[in-house]
Amino acid sequence: MPTLPPERGPHPARSSHENRQVAESFGADAARYDRARPSYPAALVDRIVTAAPGRDVLDVGCGTGIVARQFAAVGCQVLGVDVDARMADLARRRGLDVEVAAFEAWEPAGRAFDAVVSGQTWHWVDPVAGAAKAAQVLRPGGLLALFWNAGRPAPAVADAFAEVYRRVTPDSLAARQSAMSAVDGYSALCAEAAEGIGKANGFAAAEHWRFDWERAYTRDEWLDQLPTQGAFTRLPKPELEDVLAGVGAAIDAAGGSFTMHYATLAVAAKRTG
């Protein structure tokens, strides 16, 4: 199954940022989310840090701090903003500074930043209001960088996963997503983000970046991550258990592990003025 945002089924009824109950479901098991979700390529972090005028970073939708810790590790001062107090609490326990608010309503209190970043989150933010808020808090020449991991295993493994979703939850979002290209889905999110940046004004033309990488998963590692994905966070427990059993059997049949092929897609734009 491609790793797509939960609202990316065919013909979503509402824009992502209007579907906040899904966005706020990830904190139900914040520790698992923090443990199981992948990080981002070092090359992406380096490119953002190099393009920004300084090292004051605002991480929008920081969650448990996966992105924030990567930037802190290369010497950045990072402030996180997240709508979910459960996720923010875990990030604080990891030593990060986090404020709880929806980004569009967050009060910067006169603070300014060299980069505003958002990993796997910007589709929960109103694309125009969010970009306008980013322009408000960025210093001249500061960088807005929005990015997503899009992953898909080898075709045989992807087909085996899809068969499980269609059999166990035939009407679910997971079953609908199984036929979709992760890169295509996230490319659409990037296009929406770039359009929002353009409408907000205050930015140079957006650039699109891509970083390809791979990660091997054991059976247990993937079954740990699967419940953290938006298509599964609100699935009834009996159905989730059947999905995990089926996916586990598919991974066993593939030899007990598989390789996820990731493309990290990013939209980046510099603050003008």
Image (cartoon, rainbow, N blue to C red):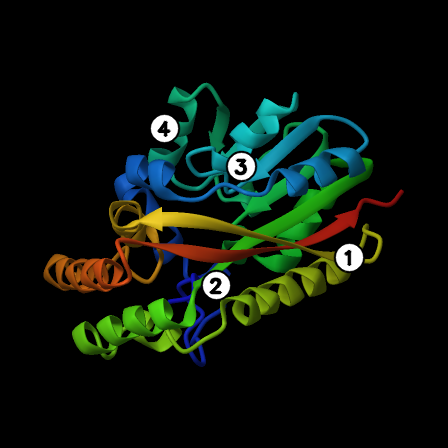
For the residues labelled 1 and 4, the Cα–Cα distance comes to 33 Å
Task: Determine the residue located farthest toward the front in the rendered image.
Answer: 255
Neighbourhood count class around disc 1 (C-alpha, 10 Å): few under 14, some 14–19, many 20 upward? many
Instruction: Indicate left or right for 211 with 100 as reference.
Output: right
Quarter of the rendering occupied by the N terminus: bottom left
Which label's residue is closer to the chain start, 2 or 3?
Answer: 2
For the residues labelled 2 and 3, the Cα–Cα distance comes to 21 Å
Q: Nearer the viewer, mark 2 or mark 3?
A: 3
Task: Provide the residue designation for mark 2.
Answer: 16
Give residue 237's position: percent from left, percent from top. Answer: 13, 57
**Residue 44 occupies quadrant:** top right
**Residue at horizontal 59%, vertical 42%?**
41
In the displayed structure, 251 sits above or below 138; it is below
Give residue 179's position: percent from left, percent from top. Answer: 40, 78
For the residues labelled 4 and 3, the Cα–Cα distance comes to 14 Å
Give the structural element (helix, strand or loop) at label 1.
loop
Task: Determine the residue located farthest toward the right in the rendered image.
Answer: 273
Task: Provide the residue designation for mark 4.
Answer: 90
Which label's residue is closer to the chain start, 1 or 2?
Answer: 2
Task: Provide the residue designation for mark 3.
Answer: 67
Which mark, residue 164?
none
Which label's residue is closer to the chain start, 2 or 4?
Answer: 2
Please, what is the three-letter code of the amino acid marked with disc 3? Val
Give the structural element (helix, strand or loop) at label 2.
helix
For the residues labelled 2 and 4, the Cα–Cα distance comes to 25 Å
Which label's residue is closer to the chain start, 3 or 1?
Answer: 3
For the residues labelled 3 and 1, the Cα–Cα distance comes to 21 Å
Please, what is the three-letter code of the amino acid marked with disc 4? Leu
- CB-based contact (under 8 Å), mark 1 and mark 2: no
Which mark, residue 206?
1
